[in-house]
Amino acid sequence: MQRRSAINKENRAKLKIVHTSGVRSFQRTRALFKNPESDEISPALLYKKTHTNKDGMWTLEDARENFEKMEVSYKSYTKVEIFAEVLG
Protein backbone atom coordinates (compact mmCIF):
# COMPACT_ATOMS: atom_id res chain seq x y z
CA MET A 1 0.00 0.00 0.00
CA GLN A 2 2.80 2.46 0.84
CA ARG A 3 4.61 1.57 -2.38
CA ARG A 4 1.51 2.40 -4.44
CA SER A 5 1.09 5.66 -2.52
CA ALA A 6 4.68 6.64 -3.29
CA ILE A 7 4.20 5.89 -6.99
CA ASN A 8 1.01 7.96 -7.09
CA LYS A 9 2.74 10.85 -5.32
CA GLU A 10 5.52 10.81 -7.92
CA ASN A 11 3.00 10.76 -10.77
CA ARG A 12 1.03 13.70 -9.32
CA ALA A 13 4.26 15.69 -8.96
CA LYS A 14 4.87 15.28 -12.71
CA LEU A 15 1.58 16.97 -13.65
CA LYS A 16 2.04 20.44 -15.11
CA ILE A 17 -1.60 21.48 -14.79
CA VAL A 18 -3.88 20.23 -12.03
CA HIS A 19 -7.67 19.91 -12.18
CA THR A 20 -10.30 20.48 -9.52
CA SER A 21 -12.46 17.40 -10.14
CA GLY A 22 -10.89 15.32 -7.39
CA VAL A 23 -11.55 11.63 -7.84
CA ARG A 24 -14.56 12.26 -10.10
CA SER A 25 -13.93 11.12 -13.68
CA PHE A 26 -14.17 13.58 -16.54
CA GLN A 27 -17.09 11.58 -17.98
CA ARG A 28 -19.01 11.93 -14.75
CA THR A 29 -18.13 15.63 -14.57
CA ARG A 30 -19.33 16.05 -18.16
CA ALA A 31 -22.66 14.44 -17.21
CA LEU A 32 -23.07 16.81 -14.25
CA PHE A 33 -22.36 19.98 -16.23
CA LYS A 34 -23.98 19.21 -19.59
CA ASN A 35 -26.72 21.44 -20.92
CA PRO A 36 -30.09 19.73 -20.29
CA GLU A 37 -31.53 21.10 -23.56
CA SER A 38 -28.76 19.98 -25.90
CA ASP A 39 -27.53 17.15 -23.65
CA GLU A 40 -23.86 18.12 -24.16
CA ILE A 41 -21.07 20.43 -23.01
CA SER A 42 -18.22 21.71 -25.13
CA PRO A 43 -14.75 20.35 -24.32
CA ALA A 44 -13.51 23.93 -23.75
CA LEU A 45 -16.24 24.65 -21.20
CA LEU A 46 -15.63 21.31 -19.48
CA TYR A 47 -11.93 22.22 -19.31
CA LYS A 48 -12.82 25.56 -17.70
CA LYS A 49 -15.15 23.92 -15.17
CA THR A 50 -12.50 21.36 -14.19
CA HIS A 51 -9.58 23.81 -13.97
CA THR A 52 -11.10 26.67 -11.97
CA ASN A 53 -11.76 26.85 -8.25
CA LYS A 54 -15.20 27.44 -6.73
CA ASP A 55 -14.55 31.19 -6.74
CA GLY A 56 -13.75 31.12 -10.47
CA MET A 57 -9.97 31.47 -10.16
CA TRP A 58 -7.83 29.34 -12.49
CA THR A 59 -5.71 26.65 -10.85
CA LEU A 60 -2.70 27.85 -12.86
CA GLU A 61 -2.00 30.57 -15.40
CA ASP A 62 -1.14 27.85 -17.95
CA ALA A 63 -4.66 26.43 -17.59
CA ARG A 64 -6.17 29.86 -18.37
CA GLU A 65 -3.89 30.22 -21.41
CA ASN A 66 -4.93 26.77 -22.69
CA PHE A 67 -8.59 27.74 -22.37
CA GLU A 68 -8.01 30.99 -24.26
CA LYS A 69 -6.28 29.06 -27.05
CA MET A 70 -9.31 26.76 -27.24
CA GLU A 71 -11.66 29.73 -27.53
CA VAL A 72 -9.57 31.43 -30.24
CA SER A 73 -9.42 28.22 -32.27
CA TYR A 74 -13.14 27.58 -31.85
CA LYS A 75 -14.17 29.10 -35.18
CA SER A 76 -12.00 27.03 -37.50
CA TYR A 77 -11.94 23.57 -35.90
CA THR A 78 -14.35 21.10 -34.39
CA LYS A 79 -14.58 21.04 -30.61
CA VAL A 80 -12.60 17.83 -30.22
CA GLU A 81 -9.87 18.98 -32.64
CA ILE A 82 -9.36 22.17 -30.60
CA PHE A 83 -9.09 20.23 -27.36
CA ALA A 84 -6.58 17.79 -28.87
CA GLU A 85 -4.49 20.54 -30.45
CA VAL A 86 -4.18 22.65 -27.31
CA LEU A 87 -3.55 19.82 -24.87
CA GLY A 88 -1.60 17.55 -27.20
Image (cartoon, grey):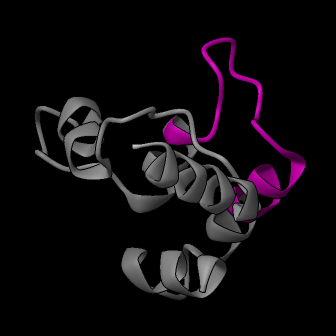
- Would residue 56 be seen by someone viewing this image from the given angle? yes
Kindly give the residue lying farthest to the front in the view shown.
2
**Which segment is the magenta one?**
50-67
Above-or-below relation of 31 to 7: above
Asked if the magenta segment contains residue 73, the reply would be no
- The quarter of the picture where the C terminus appears is bottom right
Q: Nearer the viewer, residue 2 or 14?
A: 2
Along the line of sight, which residue is nearer the eye, 14 or 81? 14
| Image location (x, y in percent) of residue 4 | 45, 53
The quadrant in which residue 85 appears is bottom right
Residue 78 in sight here: no
Q: Residue placed at 41% from the left, 60% from the top?
A: 43
Residue 61 coordinates in the image, percent (x, y): 88, 48
Identity of the residue drawn at 82% across and 59% down: 65
Give the vertical position of 22 relative to 6 (above or below): above
The residue at the point 39 percent across, 43 percent down is 1
**Position in image of residue 46 (x %, y %):** 43, 47
